[in-house]
Image: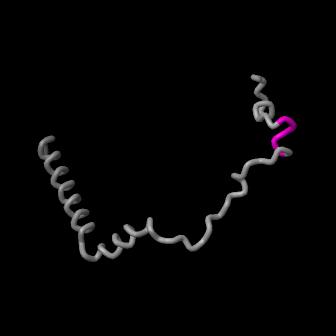
Amino acid sequence: MDTGTFRGIITFLLIVAFLGITWWAYSRRRKPDFDEAANLPFAEEDEQPIRDSSASPRSSSESGDNGDSRTNKGDRNT
């Protein structure tokens, strides 16, 4: 089997895969699922997002005396 035959077989398999995926995506059975997914950006959220307390800013007592983070990390460039 030479390189041209191998490339032809690979090309044929890729065309068949492309046509199969296209047929699956445009089939009538998938339409309700895609319509629901298309309306997701417009759906109202029922619950409030959960705040991550670890991401909240630190109070001045936690960050040190002067609040300069460079001195707390050992960086002496002032």
Q: Position of residue 27 (x, y in %)?
A: 24, 72
- The residue lying toward the viewer, choosing from 63 and 26, is 63
Q: Is residue 53 above or below residue 23?
A: above
Q: Residue at x 30, y 73 (%)?
A: 30
Quarter of the image that includes the N terminus = top left
**Res. 31 image quadrant:** bottom left
**Res. 74 image quadrant:** top right
Q: Is residue 39 above or below residue 66?
A: below
Q: Residue at x 15, y 41 (%)?
A: 3
Q: Residue furthest top?
A: 77
Provide the residue span drawn in magenta.
62-66
Quarter of the image that includes the C terminus = top right
Count every numbered label the image shows and give the total: 0
User: Which SS type dominates the magenta stretch?
Assistant: loop
Residue 65 inside the magenta-drawn segment: yes
Q: Is residue 1 above or below residue 38?
A: above
Q: Position of residue 75 (x, y in %)?
A: 76, 27
Q: Residue at x 37, y 67 (%)?
A: 38
Q: In the figure, is residue 51 to the left or right of 58?
A: left
